[in-house]
Amino acid sequence: MSTSSLSPEPAARRSARRPELLAAAAATFTVVMWASAFVSIRSAGSAYSPGALALGRLLAGALTLGVIWAVRREGLPPRAAWPGIAVSGLLWFGVYMVVLNWGEQQVDAGTAALLVNMGPILVALLGSRLLGDPLPPRLLAGMAVSFAGAIAVGFSMSGEGRASVLGVALCLIAAVGYAAGVVAQKPALGSASALQVTTFGCLVGAVLCLPFAGQLVDELGRAPASATLNMLYLGVFPTALAFTTWAYALARTTASRMGATTYAVPALVVVMSWLALDEVPGAVTLAGGALCLAGVAVARSRPRGRAEAVPAPAPSGK
């Protein structure tokens, strides 16, 4: 058999894998940006109250997304996508960002890790119930390993171990808001593009946070430039760009697998805190980060010979 007769198969295989590789790259960019957000929040959160920080971040994100959306001329999302956009905008962009900022001021890092990292587990449960997502043993085992690692990282980086009933409640609300927002966003991506869903979801969240506008204006005048720059960074990169790449990847896999991917964030936070803040991690912290990454690898793996059905790409909206 000639070499030329064998060439079309590898080319076809590479073409078939291209959407999967692009989705993996988008998910990787998202988790790196979300991990960097924790470092920036430490600076911005010392000068801005939770609601003001959330509003400033969302306004910067909405402005960035609005410019990209206008340049690409994608138009308004179709009517079928609006329920999912509205719910994800209210619960994930709005409620989640405010209560998470607030809750992490009330509890220590370990308690926050325990509660907030229930989010991916709730995504899997809600996705199975409402979206029909499969829950294969590998996914469940990987999430269990990553969850244990996230808790180890959180407790090892905790300070005085403080916690309050209010803080616990806020972190639980954040976890539920994140999970419900992701599950609501998934159907919207069946009829609207990732950019449309993210742009208008961010705008909904910004409108919800407008009651904090007075605080934001007042604190802008007193905050150091570094805190304000970190707030703007949060809006442009971890919000505008990373939420868009998240939506792109989510449109091409299940909500459960995407939720499991976010367990890589605690491990990346350890590395970034080490490099940016000179916080040298201990043995437990490093072991927890390794567990997080190992769990993600297990959760996203597939048995040999079994290909995952990849949904068709969402319409461009043009």
Image (cartoon, rainbow, N blue to C red):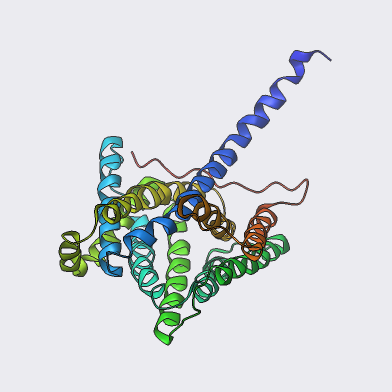
Residue found 67% across the figure and 53% down from its top: 297
The answer to whether residue 250 shows anywhere in this view is no
Q: Position of residue 215 (x, y in %)?
A: 19, 68
Quarter of the rendering occupied by the N terminus: top right
Which one is in front, 162 or 237? 162
Q: Position of residue 116 (x, y in %)?
A: 49, 71
Residue found 50% across the figure and 52% down from its top: 272
In the displayed structure, 122 sits above or below 59; it is: below
Q: Position of residue 82 (x, y in %)?
A: 33, 58
Which one is in front, 119 or 155? 155
In the displayed structure, 275 sits above or below 123; it is: above
Which one is in front, 191 or 94? 94
Relative side of 48 to 16, left or right: left
The answer to whether residue 28 shows anywhere in this view is yes
Residue found 16% across the figure and 62% down from its top: 217
Q: Position of residue 313 (x, y in %)?
A: 49, 43
In the displayed structure, 310 sits above or below 73; it is: below
Name the residue at the right extreme: 1
Residue 288's image quarter?
bottom right
Relative side of 96 to 3, left or right: left
Relative side of 140 to 41, left or right: right
Quarter of the rendering occupied by the C terminus: top left
Which one is in front, 273 or 26? 273
In the displayed structure, 258 sits above or below 19; it is: below
Residue 74's image quarter?
top left
Q: How many marks?
A: 0
